[in-house]
Image (spheres, helix red, strand yellow):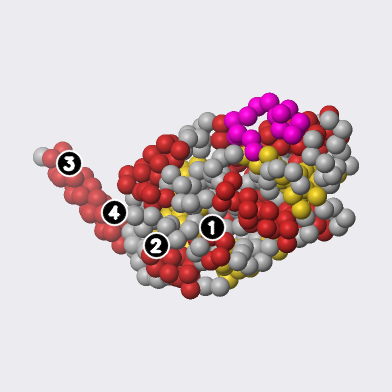
């Protein structure tokens, strides 16, 4: 009997303890987080990126563009993301591989628009924009293109949801041609060569106009070459037959092309200035052609540790080189677009691309990571969708790449 009473007592005490602990737990449970404005957990806004992560264009440009776009997203998120109507959003970059082909671009655009259902896209770079436009524009997806060539289907009246920054051929051309004129006031005659990628009839007349506006004259025929060319000796030979040229302008090209042309010109006895409208680090040209051959090469690209680089761009440069090495190219094409989208979305206070588009079209200037930029393009592109702004120049001098100043290209007419 005593044993039975003891068991009952133990059970009763245990039951009281369990009930007490449960009551204490209920009382001690923290209150759920507030869902009021400014305190709710951040939502996610996906930004699509059309970039070639495989194929020849990936190593030429897009890997570096991709990595710097990722860093741009990280920096925006660390700064609090973006805020629309009191709701906080962190950005997520969704990259689809364009595979360095036009068909790959179209497929990647379809995946972003219809499978991932993104409403905002950055890219593609290079000459790969036109295959994306028939997918993105009917779906009313806003695209900040990575590069433009003034070709149909990039940024024009037929692509109302496509917009562009100063990362593009005519905008970089203006910047580097102004830089050429500042540093070579006596130069007059230009030998001009360019890729034969379909953009020549649309872009090159505009480039020649810019050259002439700044006191240059193109001598001889414009010399085209295929993008896939490997042996540039025929192109070099044609350039060297032109009489009286003061400088060679390789309007745009992948790095191996500029390296091969530069080396060929030096081997052929020409030691004057060589310029390009492509954002190619001149250290790369020195590695391909030799440091002596690279002397005098000038391109429109940012230079690591440039004291005049705007703070956000300088921080991005620090992070990308810390992560991937000091020789990693600084390719801001889509990073610029990511920051511009943040600015425009917050200005519109909307995640509807049509409303963000309308806000863009109502503006005459906009803040960018490289400074205040003017919005234009009606005459050159047929639509007011192009952001101008400061363009950096770099030159290879005394055995290394050094900054050659920033040129404000102003309003794109």
**Can the viewer see residue 397 in this picture?**
yes
Mark 4 vs mark 3, CA separation in Å = 21 Å
Mark closest to the chain's N terminus, 1 or 4: 4
Dot 2, crowdedness within 10 Å: few (<14), some or many (≥20)?
Answer: some
Residue 118 pos. (x, y %):
38, 52
Secondary structure beneath label 2: helix
Mark 2 vs mark 1, CA separation in Å = 15 Å
Q: In which quadrant of the rendered image does the N terminus lie?
A: top left
Residue 353: give its label. Answer: 2
In front: mark 2 or mark 4? 2
Instruction: Name the quadrant containing residue 197.
Output: top right
Q: Residue furthest left?
A: 1
In front: mark 2 or mark 1? 1
Instruction: Name the quadrant containing residue 328.
Output: top right
Mark 2 vs mark 3, CA separation in Å = 72 Å
318 shown above or below 405? above
The residue carrying mark 1 is 164
- Comparing 193 with 11, the one in front is 193
Residue 21: give its label. Answer: 4
Residue 107 pos. (x, y %):
38, 39
292 shown above or below 149? above
Secondary structure beneath label 3: helix
- Comparing 341 with 41, the one in front is 341
Dot 3, crowdedness within 10 Å: few (<14), some or many (≥20)?
Answer: few
Secondary structure beneath label 4: helix
- Start-end of magenta stretch: 224-238
Mark closest to the chain's N terminus, 4 or 3: 3
Say which residue appears at 84% left-offset and 44% top-offset: 244
Residue 248: give its label. Answer: none
Mark 1 vs mark 3, CA separation in Å = 82 Å
Mark 1 vs mark 4, CA separation in Å = 63 Å
């Amino acid at each position: 009997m005593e044993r039975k009473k003891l068991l009952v007592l133990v059970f009763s005490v245990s039951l009281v303890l369990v009930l007490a602990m449960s009551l204490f737990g209920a009382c001690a449970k923290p209150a759920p987080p507030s869902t009021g404005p400014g305190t709710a957990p951040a939502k996610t806004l996906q930004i699509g990126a059309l970039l070639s992560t495989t194929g020849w264009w990936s190593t030429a440009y897009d890997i570096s563009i991709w990595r710097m776009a990722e860093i741009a997203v990280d920096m925006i998120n660390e700064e609090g993301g973006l805020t629309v109507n009191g709701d906080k959003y962190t950005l997520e970059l969704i990259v689809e591989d364009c595979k360095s082909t036009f068909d790959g671009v179209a497929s990647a655009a379809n995946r972003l628009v219809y499978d991932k259902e993104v409403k905002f896209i950055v890219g593609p770079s290079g000459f790969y924009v036109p295959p994306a436009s028939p997918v993105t524009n009917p779906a009313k997806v806003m695209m900040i293109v990575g590069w433009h060539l003034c070709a149909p289907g990039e940024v024009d009246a037929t692509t109302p949801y496509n917009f562009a920054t100063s990362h593009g051929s005519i905008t970089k051309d203006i910047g580097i041609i102004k830089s050429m004129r500042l540093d070579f006031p006596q130069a007059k005659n230009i030998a001009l060569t360019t890729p034969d990628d379909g953009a020549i009839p649309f872009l090159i007349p505009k480039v020649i106009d810019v050259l002439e506006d700044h006191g240059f004259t193109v001598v001889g025929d414009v010399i085209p070459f295929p993008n896939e060319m490997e042996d540039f000796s025929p192109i070099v030979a044609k350039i060297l037959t032109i009489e009286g040229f003061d400088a060679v302008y390789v309007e745009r090209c992948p790095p191996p092309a500029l390296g091969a042309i530069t080396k060929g010109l030096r081997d052929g006895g020409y030691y004057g200035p060589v310029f390009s409208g492509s954002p190619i680090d001149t250290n790369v040209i020195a590695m391909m052609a030799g440091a002596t051959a690279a002397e005098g090469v000038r391109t429109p690209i940012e230079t690591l540790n440039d004291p005049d680089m705007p703070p956000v761009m300088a921080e991005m440069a620090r992070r990308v080189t810390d992560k991937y090495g000091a020789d990693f190219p600084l390719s801001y094409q889509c990073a610029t677009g990511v920051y511009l989208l943040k600015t425009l979305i917050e200005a519109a206070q909307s995640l509807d691309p049509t409303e963000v588009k309308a806000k863009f079209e109502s503006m005459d200037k906009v803040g960018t990571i490289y400074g205040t930029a003017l919005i234009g393009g009606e005459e050159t592109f047929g639509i007011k969708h192009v952001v101008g702004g400061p363009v950096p120049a770099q030159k290879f001098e005394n055995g290394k790449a050094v900054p050659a100043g920033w040129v404000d290209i102003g309003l794109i007419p």
